[in-house]
Structures are given as C-alpha cells and as structure tokens.
Image (tube, helix red, strand yellow):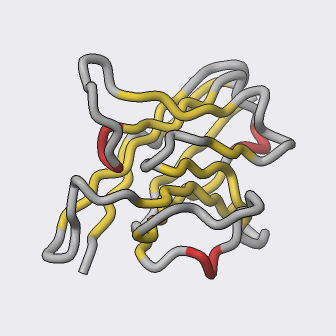
C-alpha cells in the first residue's frame, strides 16, 4: 500500500497564503516511479471538488480553472528531482471560500488525458488537512 499524509493546513487571514505538502510511504511506494498527484478539497456541507494535479513524470500541471490564478505547485528548494513528496501546493490570495479539508491523492503512472480532476482516477488518498480562512 501507499500511505499519504498531508501537512501544512491551518488558519490564515483572507489574502494570505498557505502551502500544503503530501508525504508518501508504504510498501508499494516507489520514489522513483512516476505518479499522478492531485489535491481535492471538501468544504463543510459541500461535495468534494478537484483543486489541482501534477503529472510527476512530465511535470505538467493542471489547476482547476477557478483557482489557477491563485494555486500552483512548487518544488522544494534544493530538490533536483521531482517526486511526490518534494512538491507543495502553494495557495495564495486566500479567501474564506477556500476553507475546507484538503486531501492529497495519488495514482501510479501518468495523469489521464485530457486533463481532469476526477476522484475515481486516484487509488491512494490521505486523511486530509484542514484549512480555515478568516475574513
């Protein structure tokens, strides 16, 4: 299995920033293998929605059109290899509507094409990290 653990959630003021990370471990996790890594979020009382994904093999990102001006993946400083656990999701210009539980998800291999954010595409899921944005 592959275990995913999110970190970096917390509280922020509107207009602020947070960075979310996803660490991976487990008997089936291979750091050298390409994965499709995605982030989803679920606000209280709402359905889970896709936020962004990145094809680790190619580095190609896809961010939900409604978020692409504020959310982006970045790589850890000093890291020369793109792996599942050297990537962070940078969230800027946060709004109260961004408050939600954020989940990382991963699936071995390349991301599906055309780009989409579909829960069924991902085999492994983290437990989620809470993000609260106050006005």
Count up the numbered dots.
Answer: 0
Pick the front one: 90 or 76 = 76
- In the rendered view of the protein, which quadrant contains the N terminus? bottom left
- 83 with respect to 117 (left or right): left
Pick the front one: 114 or 76 = 114
State which quadrant residue 90 falls in: top right
Image coordinates of residue 80 in percent, x first then y, are 27, 26
State which quadrant residue 92 falls in: top right
Looking at the image, residue 84 lies above or below residue 16: below
- 118 with respect to 8 (left or right): right
Please report the residue visible at 52 percent of the width from the left and 37 percent of the height from the top.
Answer: 89
Looking at the image, residue 127 lies above or below residue 133: below
Image coordinates of residue 65 in percent, x first then y, are 84, 43
Image coordinates of residue 51 in percent, x first then y, are 68, 51
Please report the residue visible at 44 percent of the width from the left and 36 percent of the height from the top.
Answer: 88
Image coordinates of residue 116 in percent, x first then y, are 74, 62
Please report the residue visible at 52 percent of the width from the left and 51 percent of the height from the top.
Answer: 55
Outermost residue toward the left?
27
Please report the residue visible at 63 percent of the width from the left and 20 percent of the height from the top.
Answer: 16
């Amino acid at each position: 299995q592959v275990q995913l653990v999110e970190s970096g959630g917390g509280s922020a003021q509107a207009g602020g920033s947070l960075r979310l990370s996803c660490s991976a471990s487990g008997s089936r996790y291979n750091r050298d293998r390409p994965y499709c890594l995605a982030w989803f979020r679920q606000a209280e009382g709402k359905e889970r929605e896709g936020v962004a994904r990145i094809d680790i093999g190619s580095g190609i990102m896809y961010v939900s059109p409604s978020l692409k001006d504020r959310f982006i993946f970045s790589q850890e400083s000093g890291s020369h290899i793109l792996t599942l656990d050297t990537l962070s999701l940078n969230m800027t210009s946060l709004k109260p509507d961004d408050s939600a539980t954020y989940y990382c998800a991963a699936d071995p291999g390349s991301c599906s094409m055309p780009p989409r954010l579909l829960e069924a595409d991902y085999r492994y899921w983290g437990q989620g990290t809470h993000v609260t944005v106050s006005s």
